[in-house]
Amino acid sequence: MNLDQFAAVISGRLIVSCQAGPDHPLRDTPTIARMAESAVLGGACAIRCGGVGGLDDVRAVAEAVSVPVIGLTKRGRTGVFITPTVDDALAVLEAGATVVATDGTRRTRPDGAPLNRTIDAVHTAGGLVMADVSTEAEGIAAAEAGADLIATTLSGYTPDSPGRPGPDLALVAALAAALPSELIVAEGRYHEPAHVRAARDAGATAVVVGTAITDPAWITSTFAAAV
């Protein structure tokens, strides 16, 4: 799938992130695959997956659904840990992902390679790259390095980006204004349908929602708090 085809699939639509942490009751690859199938039934245009489940989750989801898969791996929980090396990126692509999600910040990567080396390697292998960033400057630099999509995934999770309770709509708007020809994906703390609409109004091409759809523990706690 080329960039134009992928853009046509996701524009104005919802991407669902299907992941579960190491201690979560749903941390099971077949469960993640069924979660992805359920999300597609509900209208998800693509699935983001991998994370702790790594390549096994990417393979299982790619086999289970007919929509594109945005794949990733995670190493550790600090620094550059989202698909941090060139080899990781190529392995995600080989596992069946259409798009490889990778840290798009300016921080030093574990293999010492610059971001553009990962992007070039994925492009050479026939894939697309989503750069997860935390600031406008990082998004612009990632676009200049050749990333196909710029996502706000890391807003609030790096030293250059203060934490916040809700989605970073200001970053979405800034990236959309600075990079009008790029695909801008809003991700990070989108917990209500109104947040999704606001992201689209701010200029996002598509919006990724994870926890609020795929984590029954979080959903239950939200309702329980209202009782």
Image: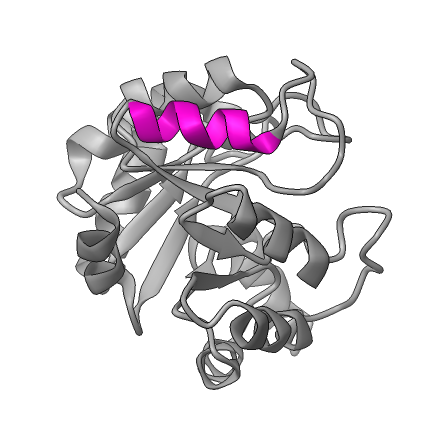
Asked if residue 125 lies left or right of residue 220, the reply is left
In this view, 10 is above or below 157: below
* Picture residue at 39% right of the left edge, 16% below the top: 91
- Residue 133 screen position, x and y as percent: 63, 50
Q: Left or right: where does residue 33 sit relative to residue 87?
A: left
- Residue 123 among those drawn in magenta: yes
Rendered image quadrant of residue 10 = bottom left
Tell me how many marks there are. Answer: 0
Residue 212 percent location from the top left of the image: 50, 62
**At which x and y percent is residue 160?**
84, 52
Q: What residue is shown at x 54% (from left), y 32% (from top)?
A: 116
Query: Residue at the location (81% across, 60% down)?
Result: 163
Residue occupying the point 34% across, 33% down: 31
- Picture quadrant of residue 60: top left
Work out which residue is located at the far front of the displayed protein and give it: 144
Nearest to the observer: residue 89 or residue 43: 89
* Figure quadrant of residue 18: top left
Looking at the rendered image, the quarter that the C terminus falls into is bottom right
Is any atom of residue 222 visible in this view?
yes
Does the magenta-highlighted stretch encompass residue 87? no
Residue 217 vs residue 45, the one in the foreground:
45
Q: Magenta region's main secondary structure?
A: helix
Q: Nearer the viewer, residue 56 or 2?
A: 2
Q: How is the image coloured?
A: one colour
- Compared to residue 9, the image places residue 38 above or below, namely above
Q: Is residue 56 left or right of residue 105?
A: left
In the image, taking residue 113 as reference, residue 58 lies left or right, namely left
The image shows residue 177 at horizontal and vertical percentages of 56, 77
Q: In the rendered view of the protein, which quadrant contains the N terminus?
A: top left
Residues in magenta?
115-124
Residue 29 seen in the figure: no
